[in-house]
Structure formats: structure tokens, C-alpha cells
Image (tube, rainbow, N blue to C red):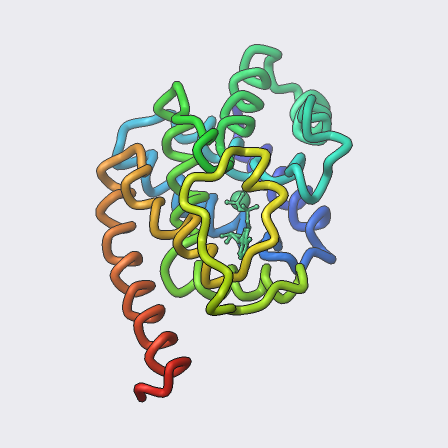
């Protein structure tokens, strides 16, 4: 694989997500690409496979492109058009299909490359960026920030998670605070610990202000 294909993949994703404001904009993919590269280098995974999978990881997303989600048609056609081997395409599509958080039905990737991409995608859901993305997503989907009577559901199936209509603060308990323990690589786990502390401070402050304690 040559470097050119990475540049072309970047251009492809950038154009595809041009009008996307739900937390999956091009810059999300760019951050996942950079973080995944960093993790792959530290963990000794195949960097090019990781980079291509990171760049393609959201182009067939369940929410953004439901019609191509099952067969990963966008990723497949881009990779085929750029002469990537059939077996490499299958490997990349498998990484993409295993990446998502879907409650207790989430899977741990089978390959070192898949672990790097999943960890990078999940790191972008936590910390300062993660907080911002969660509230951006909530606003985009008409969700309340918080409601004292709506309790988090800590053990959702894929079905329940996908159809949930909870608050954004609940999302921290339903997904974001679970991610540190779910990291596959030690490199990501140590970054995740710091980001989780930051989110805990944020939620504590949010509740203090909400309850008038501050
Ligand atoms: P990913 O990029 O990891 O596949 P998702 O598609 O699950 O992420 O979600 C995109 C962003 O929106 C993530 O930062 C995620 O935490 C956030 N998000 C997803 N579902 C919710 C929700 N119900 N409430 C608030 N934020 C959410
Ligand atoms: Ni993503």
C-alpha cells in the first residue's frame, strides 16, 4: 500500500462528512486516525491497515449510512477502486464492523489492528472532546441534558442501546464511564484513565450547579 491511498482516503472521508454535525464530522475521523496511528506504533500493530480502517470506520455507520451499514458498501467500493487486495478489504471491513459500542453486545476485536482502531474511536468519546461530542449529539437528537427522574440503564442490549431515548448526562453512565475498562491496549487505557478523571470532575461540577450547591 502506498502513502497516496491514505491521502485519497482522507479526501474521500472529508467530502463525505462535509455536512455532518452529529458528532461524526471529518475532524472526528481525523482524530481517530491520529490516535489510532499513535497506538499502533506503540503496540506494534500494522500501521497502514490501522490507518485505512480508522479513515473508513464511519463511512458505513449505522446512523449515517444505514443502507450501506450491513455490507460496508462505501468502504468496499473506495478500497476496490484503489486496488486494495480482496483479503485486505475483508480485514478492514471486519475491523470496522467490530468497532462500535452497542451496550453489553459490544465486541472485543479479534486482531491487534482492530484493537487499535476501536480504542482510538472510544478515546474520542471521552475527555473534553467526549463531553463536547455528547452534548452536540444530544442537541442534534433533541435530547434533554439531564432529567432528575430519568435514571440511567447500565446494562442495555444492542437493541435497547440503539433505541434508547435517554438524557445526555445518562449517556456518561450508560457508555462513557464504561470505556476505560473496555480499552484493549495498555496505551489507550492509560490515556483513558486521565480522560475519565476529567469527565468525573465535570459531572460532579454539573450536579453541584444543578442542585444549587455552588
Ligand atoms: P462512535 O464514533 O464511537 O461510533 P457513536 O456513533 O456511538 O460513536 O456516537 C457519536 C458520538 O455521540 C460519541 O461521542 C458518543 O458518545 C455520542 N453519543 C452517542 N449516543 C449518545 C447519546 N445517546 N447521548 C449523548 N451522546 C451520544
Ligand atoms: Ni467513530
Q: Where is 42 relative to 86, above or below?
A: below
How many marks the image carries: the answer is 0
Which residue is drawn at the image coordinates 34% and 71% (left, top)? 202
Please tell me which residue lies in front, 180 or 170: 170
Q: Which residue is at a point 68% across and 30% down the rendered structure image?
A: 69
Viewer-nearest residue: 115 or 126: 126
Q: Looking at the rendering, which quadrant does residue 179 occupy?
A: top left
| Percent x, y of residue 200 | 29, 64
Q: Pick out the residue farthest to the top.
A: 87
Give coordinates of residue 108: x percent, y percent. 39, 26
The residue lying toward the viewer, choosing from 84 and 19, is 19
Q: Is the residue 4 above or below the residue 23 in the image?
A: above
Residue at 44% over, 59% down: 130
Q: Residue at x 38, y 75 (%)?
A: 206
Q: Would residue 144 appear left or right of 208 to someone viewing this image?
A: right
Residue at the limit of the structure toward the front, as seen here: 149
Q: Looking at the rendering, which quadrant does residue 86 occupy?
A: top right
Compared with 46, 152 (above or below) is below
Residue 23 location, quadrant: bottom right
Q: Which quadrant does the C terminus fall into?
A: bottom left
Direction from residue 194 to residue 130 in the image, left or right: right
- The one of 214 and 124 positioned closer to us in this rendering: 214
Left of 10 or right of it: where is 154?
A: left
- Which x, y percent locates residue 30? 52, 50
Amino acid at each position: 500500500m502506498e502513502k497516496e491511498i491514505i491521502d485519497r482516503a482522507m479526501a474521500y472521508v472529508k467530502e463525505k462528512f462535509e455536512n455532518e454535525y452529529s458528532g461524526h464530522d471529518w475532524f472526528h475521523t481525523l482524530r481517530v486516525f491520529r490516535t489510532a496511528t499513535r497506538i499502533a506504533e506503540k503496540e506494534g500493530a500494522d500501521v497502514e491497515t490501522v490507518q485505512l480502517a480508522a479513515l473508513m470506520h464511519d463511512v458505513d455507520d449505522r446512523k449515517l449510512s444505514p443502507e450501506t451499514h450491513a455490507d460496508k458498501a462505501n468502504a468496499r467500493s473506495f478500497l476496490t477502486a484503489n486496488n486494495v487486495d480482496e483479503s485486505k478489504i475483508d480485514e478492514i471491513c471486519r475491523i470496522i464492523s467490530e468497532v462500535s459500542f452497542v451496550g453489553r453486545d459490544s465486541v472485543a476485536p479479534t486482531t491487534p489492528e482492530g484493537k487499535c482502531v476501536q480504542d482510538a474511536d472510544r478515546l474520542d468519546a471521552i475527555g473534553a472532546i467526549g463531553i463536547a461530542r455528547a452534548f452536540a449529539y444530544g442537541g442534534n437528537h433533541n435530547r434533554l441534558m439531564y432529567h432528575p427522574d430519568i435514571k440511567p440503564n447500565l446494562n442495555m442490549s444492542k437493541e435497547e442501546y440503539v433505541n434508547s431515548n435517554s438524557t445526555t448526562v445518562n449517556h456518561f453512565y450508560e457508555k462513557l464511564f464504561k470505556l476505560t475498562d473496555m480499552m484493549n491496549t495498555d496505551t489507550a487505557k492509560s490515556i483513558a484513565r486521565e480522560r475519565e478523571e476529567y469527565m468525573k470532575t465535570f459531572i460532579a461540577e454539573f450536579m453541584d450547579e444543578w442542585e444549587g450547591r455552588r
